[in-house]
Image (tube, rainbow, N blue to C red):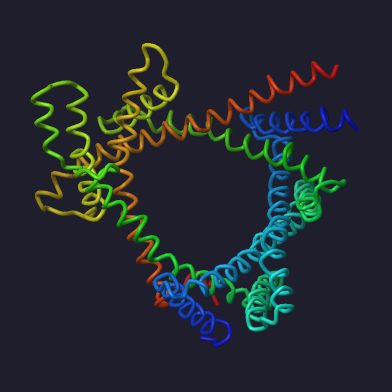
Amino acid sequence: MGFISTVFWPTIAVILSLTVYSFLWKDNFLYKVAEHLFIGVTVGYTIGSAWNQIIIPKLVEPVIRNFSDGKYLLAFWLIIGGVLGMFYFSRFSEKTSWLSRYPIAITVGFYAGYSIVPIWISYVSKQFHATILNPAGEPMLNFKLFNVFFSNPTYANLLKALNGPLIVIGVIIVLIYFFFSFKNDNFIIKTSRTPALVYLMLGFGGAFGYTFMARISLFIGRMNFIFSDWIGLIKNSL
Amino acid sequence: MSLWKRRLPLICTIVFGIMGFILQLVPAFKSFLDIQNQWMTILFGFAIVIGVASLTKYHFKKIRQKPEERIFSYITFSSLIVMAVATLFGMKAETGIFNALYKNLFDYVYVPLDATIFSLLAFYITSAAFRAFKASSWLSTLLLFAGGIVMLGRVAFGPLMVFGELTQWIMSVPTVAAMRGIKIGIGLGMMATSIKIILGIERSFLGGE
């Protein structure tokens, strides 16, 4: 039993990791096994966690509690939610699958209305606010910083003075680029197109490099598990 | 347009959309908002059924049409059942065989497969970058330059620390400006779509007749 818990399962993890990496050579039987295993395990885990973390604590337990507390209206409201949720099961039959439109329609409708204000706050209002004021509460277009630079011309002072205006200009021209992407002869729209592309290319390049390094760190983590943790485990067990 | 099949679901969308908007906006409805959030979570909990239904349909079809590949469908179904049973009975349990099975399947099957499949993307990104990052124009050279600097900057040490500083500047000035512009555009687009859904203009989520 000790062998199973200390060596067997970590070895399974190593075999599965190597099986997935075998796809780099070519698509093969073992990779397909690992891929389908992953799909099954993921869906199985989602079913189990939906039952344990949502259905039981948010539906079954509150309904029993509300009935015993005499809060019948609340209990019935939760039961209606449960019944509507069960309408999803109608997807298994072609004849009754239209019933699943009810929970979908309610979910889509509710979150469409519910998310308008948070979207405005986090995606629009806060972004404009951060373009006007920096986190310290100072204006982004702070021209006094240029005076500081001219009185003490260092590289750090130049960057401090330029960064704020560069962000403000960048946001404005990127917005112009996206909103006026159709053919337009307006002078401002025409001349701001190339600088907007410069910002976007630098931004996408930066985002790419960042994502790439995140994936590489995952790869290093897997290699670390195989060549450090697992090999060490095997050496100690033998 | 059938009343039960299309019109009533659409009315539900409009009513619940207006309800969601009002609940978010009026602080006096805070307690009802909490109940409604719990109610919506229940619906979410059942939504996994859609995933299971699609997966089952797809694999049953595959078993019928491609008998040589049915082994993969059996693997999917058996791993689904084993993991679902282990999670159902072992997630909340502190000890026992189901708890041990759940923990081992999660730690040594689910987590390694998840991390490995995502790390596999590093190689695809590299391959895609090799094709996309050709210095064919000065703008694509800029993309190549920014990507290269950030990659070097994330692991910079010693004399290469200059790449670290450059990375910090790229991530905090041009990337912030570009992503902020994009984010504002996305936000306005999402709001417009939400309003279209509430008004019943956008109804593609209800599917075809």
Along the viewing direction, whichever of B197 and A84 lies nearer the viewer: A84
Report x, y in % for residue A144: 11, 36
Q: Which residue, as the protein is rendered here, is positioned at the far top? A: B159
Q: How many marks?
A: 0
Picture residue at 8% right of the left edge, 26% below the top: A150
Q: Which residue, as the protein is rendered here, is positioned at the far right? A: A1
Picture residue at 74% right of the left edge, 35% below the top: A30
Query: Which corner quadrant of the image does residue B141 belong to?
Result: top left
Report x, y in % for residue A19: 71, 32
Query: Which corner quadrant of the image does residue B178 belong to?
Result: top left
Picture residue at 76% right of the left edge, 30% below the top: A10
Along the viewing direction, whichever of B2 and A77 lies nearer the viewer: A77
Quarter of the figure that contains the C terminus of chain B: bottom right
Q: In the rendered view, does A42 fall on the left or right side of B167?
A: right
Picture residue at 29% right of the left edge, 40% below the top: A200
Report x, y in % for residue A215: 53, 32
Q: Which residue, as the protein is rendered here, is positioned at the far bottom? A: B3
Report x, y in % for residue B144: 35, 28
With respect to residue A34, does B3 lie above or below?
below
Q: In the rendered view, does B174 fall on the left or right side of A226?
A: left
